[in-house]
Amino acid sequence: MCRRNAPFGHPAQHRQSGRLPWPSEYPQKGGEKDELGNLSVMLLKQFNFVQAFGGEEEDGDPAAGPGLRFFTWEEIGQRNGGGPPPQERWLVIERKVYDISHFYRRHPGGARLLESHAGQDATDAFVAFHVNKVLVSKYLKSLQIGELAPDQPSIEPTKNKMLVKDFRELRATVEKMGLLEPNQLFFFLHLAHILLLDTAAWLILFYFGTSLMPFIVSLLVLTISQVQASWLQHDLGHLSVFRKTKWNHLLHKFVMCHLLGASAKWWTLLHSQHHAKPNCFQKDPDIDMHPFLFTLGKKLSVELGIKKKKYMPYNHQHKYFFITLPPLLFPTYFQCHTFYIAYTKRYWADLAWMLTFYIRFFFTYGALLEIKSLLAYFFIFRMLESSWFVWVSQMNHIPMDIYYDNNLDWASTQLQATCNVEQSLFNDWFTGHLNFQIEHHLFPTMPRHNYWKVAPLVKSLCAKHGIEYQCKPLLTAFADIVHSLKNSGELWLDAYLHK
């Protein structure tokens, strides 16, 4: 159990001051004299003096000040939001213990992101996600309830101590090398080519008419523009384009809401959760399609089969994948979900920006196409965009380990859930540099043009600790999605029929 500095008296007083109340602070009746007398006063003064200056009664660091409470990892692990009420949620950042039970729902990055680290050490996640750590730390002060006890290790027992140490040294090296600093010319040129393609798609129909060939070419050009805009909004959402957060947020709204017609905050809400716990069932929203559409991962598939659960014919999922997730994710689910979240969470600014996309699209293309052709044009380019996005985003994750959160260290969590695709100019452009998925997950705020620079350092880290650093050809990565789905489906069927 936790060790408190003040073992009796009014709890609020003890939490705030960390000392015992003086006799004069107790409620008095009329002219009633203090019954404790001078001896009691002397004893209390001596006790509080000992507390303040680190006598035997004090468990912690005298320099930490009065009111400090110490906890063990076991105590913290029990405050994970589970069990009967009150469902407390605590986490640790750099040995400091924070109570996020009431704050997590107000967290700017989303409640689910913070909740996923409840009962755990969130130090490396905190460092990875926050650009201005000094500013954020000020808001944390009001949530701090204590620290790890002096006899507790800084790293949880479930985590690889040496890997954590080496990764933090790598992080410090990355910062010294300036690899977290963006090249704004790179991103300006990328935005310029997006806008040129977007304009060219309309001009093709304007100058060459709306016959079949110009219609198809225009669709392809607009699809390329939209996907490349998706990669740019991804950079902006990770705060990796500008040094100042506000400029990333502002341009993110322009690209995500105006150029793509989706909510920037909606994307940040979901994507941050994915990065915090990739491929962790019930914590990563990117694998929420398990088990209702697909069964994912070897262990989860066997578990599903043993429980005799069947929502889809999973043994055929590698076949119906082609006609479901890639072409339909954007025009159906994302199209509706982004509006639903933006409306229910009152992202009014995002909704206003999103409306400008639809006004612009239907006004400009509506002047050239009839209503049926216009709707077909919109739906087809959304399907093409969706297919491109799904194949690229899932090639790095679906073939990897998918299971429940085992509270591993940051590096292990990211490395077991991600793999890379070989580097080339085409692969870099086609995937928005997400062919360096390992580096991106380890350093989510790193500008993508620096991934290739840090890759050799990450490979060395993996080799030192005996961790596989997977890197494949692009087409092999695509094929592995299908093979993984087929294997998961077969494992499910075997467990479903025979166990």
Image (cartoon, rainbow, N blue to C red):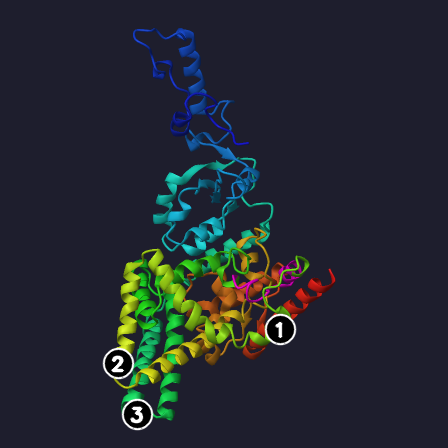
Dot 1: few (<14), some (14–19), or many (≥20) neighbours within 10 Å?
some
Dot 2: few (<14), some (14–19), or many (≥20) neighbours within 10 Å?
few
Secondary structure state at the residue bearing disc 3: loop
Question: Whole-Å distance between the Cαs marked 3 and 2?
Answer: 14 Å
Depicted 377 relative to depicted 418: above or below: below
Question: Whole-Å distance between the Cαs marked 3 and 1?
Answer: 43 Å
The residue that label 2 is drawn on is 364
| Mark 3 residue type | Gly
Secondary structure state at the residue bearing disc 2: helix
CB atoms of marks 2 and 1 within 8 Å: no
| Mark 1 residue type | His
Q: Nearer the viewer, mark 3 or mark 1?
A: 1
Residue 12 picture location, percent across and down: 39, 27
Tell me the tag on residue 209: 3
Residue 295 picture location, percent across and down: 59, 65
Looking at the rendered image, the quarter that the C terminus falls into is: bottom right
Q: Earlier in the sequence, mark 3 or mark 1?
A: 3
| Mark 2 residue type | Thr
Rendered residue at 34%/60% (across/down): 342
Confirm whether the magenta stretch covers residue 293: yes
Residue 140 picture location, percent across and down: 39, 43
Q: Earlier in the sequence, mark 3 or mark 2?
A: 3
- Provide the residue span drawn in magenta: 288-304
Left or right? Give the position of 488 relative to 230: right
The residue that label 1 is drawn on is 316
Left or right? Give the position of 454 relative to 345: right
Question: Whole-Å distance between the Cαs marked 2 and 1?
Answer: 42 Å
Q: Nearer the viewer, mark 2 or mark 1?
A: 1
Residue 368 in view of the camera: yes
Rendered residue at 41%/8% (across/down): 36
Comparing 202 with 248, the one in front is 202
